[in-house]
Image (spheres, helix red, strand yellow):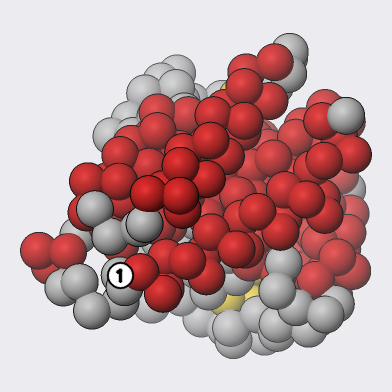
Amino acid sequence: MFRYAEGEEPGYHSADDAKAQGVTMARIHAASGRFPRWNSGRYELDLNHLLHRPLASVSALGILAADSQKSLSDLAVRLSSAVTAIEGLTQVRCHGDCHGGNARIATDGHFKWEAIFFDFDDGGPGYLAYDLAVFLWSTSLQRDGYSLWHAFVEGYRSVRRLNPIDFEAAHFFVPIRHFWLMGEYASRTVEWGREALSEKWLGRQLEYLLAWEQEKLMPKLL
């Protein structure tokens, strides 16, 4: 599709760059929705692809202790049940990997200060809330993460209406995104090796997931 995307990597603390990425994502969703076969593709970003299959890949390694494995599996059940119970979630053609690193901010020319996206290989039809959540996930460990998230959403809403249900559901998809990432590591040990997949590393990922559930999701579940 292209050889090189002009521009600079988005600033990790720049609200303007976050907003620009929200604008571009909304434009992609609006444009791709007009494609005759927008809902077909290599991947379908459903719960099987994003949550259940990654969990199976991690579990198959047999690295986690029994109690940690149970905590991980139980969390997956809770997340799946919560998402399934939400009615009316919007389906779009997802980019699938909009975490900031797959974008450039143009510094001159026709697209000056706009975000240019690339790396669509993890995309496909799926939940709008998931596509939004990838950006929220990427900022979740930053002190100013929520200000960037709100700037991103502001940019999105400046182009395309955002259903409140999808906005709220994005918080459930943050840990689901993390499950997907863990599954990527677990399913590619033949290519990448198992060095990064220690019990200690997986334990830290479980801590992150459970902390997110406790701090961000429990009020929504109660």
Q: Is residue 106 left or right of residue 159?
A: left
Q: In this view, does 176 lie above or below 87?
A: below
Q: Which residue lies furthest to the left in this view?
A: 190
Q: In which quarter of the image is the N terminus?
A: bottom left
Q: Which residue sits at x=35%, y=69%? A: 199
Which amino acid, by three-letter code, is at mark 1?
A: Leu
Residue 148 appearing in the image: yes
Q: Nearer the viewer, residue 222 or 4?
A: 222
Q: Where is residue 129 in the image (x, y as percent from the top left)?
A: 68, 37
- Quarter holding residue 220: top right
Q: Position of residue 73 (x, y in %)?
A: 46, 38
Q: Which residue sits at x=36%, y=57%? A: 65
Residue located beneath label 1 in the image: 197
Q: How many marks?
A: 1
- Quarter holding residue 81: top right
Residue 45 appearing in the image: no
**How many residues crowd around disc 1 within 10 Å: few (fewer than 14), some, or many (20 or more)?**
some
Q: Position of residue 44 (x, y in %)?
A: 39, 29
Q: Is residue 87 left or right of residue 128?
A: right
Q: Which residue sits at x=89%, y=69%? A: 147
Q: Is residue 71 left or right of residue 189?
A: right
Q: Which residue sits at x=60%, y=63%? A: 207
Q: Is residue 37 above or below residue 161?
A: above
Q: In this view, does 164 lie above or below 118?
A: above
Q: Where is residue 180 in the image (x, y as percent from the top left)?
A: 43, 49
Asked which secondary structure carries label 1, the reply is loop
